[in-house]
Amino acid sequence: MAWQASHDVGHAGFNLEEKRMLVNELEKRCKVFITSEKNLPPDLEKYRIKILPHRLHDMLYYAALLVCDGQTMTTEAAVLGTPAVQCNSLVGTMGNFDELEKNTV
């Protein structure tokens, strides 16, 4: 997530070192793909998935897990039934996640 929108002021998600640690841990257990609005350093660029934008939800539907710092993708994963972990400074402030948690089978 780029964290450049006006409503993102004062908030943040994963920093670069946290992204590296996350990828290192996840790749021990599964195949890792990264989608990103930003440029990635070479060591993470190799995980970038090249997918047409209109196919992103297909990929998300078939994913075993989404780990994300963005609200939109996390919500979309939940609606599609894909387990998702959201990590950013907005966690606990977004009512849609409370609603999804309470009313999802």
Image (cartoon, rainbow, N blue to C red):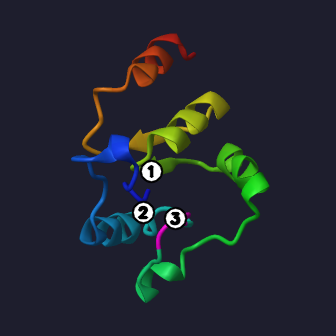
Reading the chain from its start, which is encountered first: label 1 or label 3?
Answer: 3
Which of labels 2 and 1 is toward the front? 1
* Circle 2 SS class: helix
Residue beneath disc 3: 37
| Residue type indicated by callout 1 | Val
Label number found at residue 67: 1
Q: Residue 20: which quarter of the image? A: bottom left
Residue beneath disc 2: 26
Q: Mark 2 and 3 residues: CB-CB less than 8 Å, in contact?
A: no
Q: Answer yes or no: is residue 43 visible.
A: yes
| Residue type indicated by callout 3 | Glu
Residues packed near mark 3 inside 10 Å, few (<14), some (14 to 19) or many (20 plus):
few
Left or right, 98 with reference to 58? left
* Residue situated furthest front in the rendering: 6
**Residue at coordinates 28% horizontally, 27% vertically from top-left?**
92
Q: Give the range drawn in magenta.
A: 34-38
**Residue at coordinates 45% horizontally, 88% vertically from top-left?**
42
Residues packed near mark 1 inside 10 Å, few (<14), some (14 to 19) or many (20 plus):
some
Residue 10 is inside the magenta segment: no
Residues packed near mark 2 inside 10 Å, few (<14), some (14 to 19) or many (20 plus):
few
Q: Mark 2 and 1 residues: CB-CB less than 8 Å, in contact?
A: yes
